[in-house]
């Protein structure tokens, strides 16, 4: 079966492959991806290039970043006061440069449980405090699931989707799978939607309940994904 067939609004669903910009059918804008860790110097140059290429109604997507040496390695500082300060300072600098609320050009931060923006509470705070500045909420269920959450995954999915789906500008569906034995990572690795361990039918049911039919969905159907 086509992985898009059971989604709440297949007409608004997109396949995003090789991190290329895709055009949402309802808004007339494009998605642009800035790869890597925003805390690295190279990210600034990439973000300036993307900002110059973007137009009205576009959504610029990126991670929130990490103090860690590896993009998904995690770092305890991400979840301390130092992490909150770093995220605030980065948003203060990046939003005026990358977002333009008057023309509906938005900056969407994709959350990850190893990053500065790592949970539903943090996303809700940013939605309340920064949406008027052009910050777009991104619903990315797989990114908020850490290995320790698997035993209560239904509770975590209900919380994230019920809170974020009504407020998000975009939903990204990607799957996760355990890293191979002997891997240096104790975390998951990212795989195509429908190819991993997430409860897909449950997620799709929650999306039908909470996600507006006009909200675009990016379905990751083949690697490599945005990185």
Image: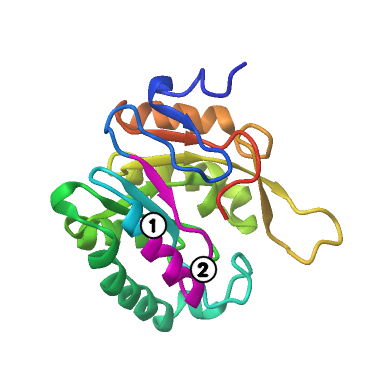
Q: Which residue is located at x 55 percent, y 78 percent? A: 76
Q: Position of residue 20 (x, y in %)?
A: 50, 43
Q: Which of the image's four quarters has the N terminus?
A: top right
Question: In front of the other: label 2 or label 1?
Answer: 1
Q: Is residue 38 inside the magenta stretch?
A: yes
Q: Residues within 10 Å of mark 2 (few under 14, many from 20)?
A: many
Residue annotated with mark 2? 37
Q: Which residue is located at x 63 percent, y 71 percent? A: 70
Q: In this rendering, is residue 181 above or below 57?
A: below
Q: Nearer the viewer, residue 142 or 215?
A: 215
| Numbered circle sitting on residue 134 | none
Q: Position of residue 203 (x, y in %)?
A: 50, 33
Q: Is residue 112 inside the magenta stretch?
A: no
What's the colour scheme?
rainbow
Q: Which residues are magenta?
A: 30-50
- Left or right: 132 in relation to 33: left
Residue annotated with mark 1? 50
């Amino acid at each position: 079966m086509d992985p898009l067939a059971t989604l709440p609004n297949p007409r608004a669903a997109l396949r995003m492959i090789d991190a290329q910009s895709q055009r949402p059918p309802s808004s007339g804008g494009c998605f642009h991806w800035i790869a890597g860790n925003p805390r690295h110097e190279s990210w600034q140059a990439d973000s300036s290039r993307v900002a110059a290429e973007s137009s009205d109604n576009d959504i610029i997507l990126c991670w929130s970043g990490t103090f860690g040496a590896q993009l998904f390695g995690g770092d305890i500082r991400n979840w301390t006061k130092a992490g909150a300060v770093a995220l605030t300072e980065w948003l203060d600098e990046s939003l005026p440069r990358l977002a333009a609320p008057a023309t509906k050009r938005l900056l969407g931060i994709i959350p990850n449980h190893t990053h500065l923006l790592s949970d539903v509470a943090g996303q809700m705070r940013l939605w309340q405090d920064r949406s008027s500045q052009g910050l777009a909420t991104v619903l990315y269920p797989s990114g908020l699931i850490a290995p320790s959450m698997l035993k209560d995954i239904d509770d975590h999915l209900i919380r994230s989707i019920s809170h974020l789906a009504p407020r998000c500008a975009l939903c990204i569906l990607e799957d996760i799978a355990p890293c191979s034995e002997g891997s240096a990572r104790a975390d998951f690795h990212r795989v195509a939607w429908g190819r991993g361990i997430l409860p897909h039918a449950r997620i799709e049911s929650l999306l039908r309940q909470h996600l507006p039919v006009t909200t675009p969905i990016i379905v990751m159907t083949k690697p490599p994904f945005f990185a």
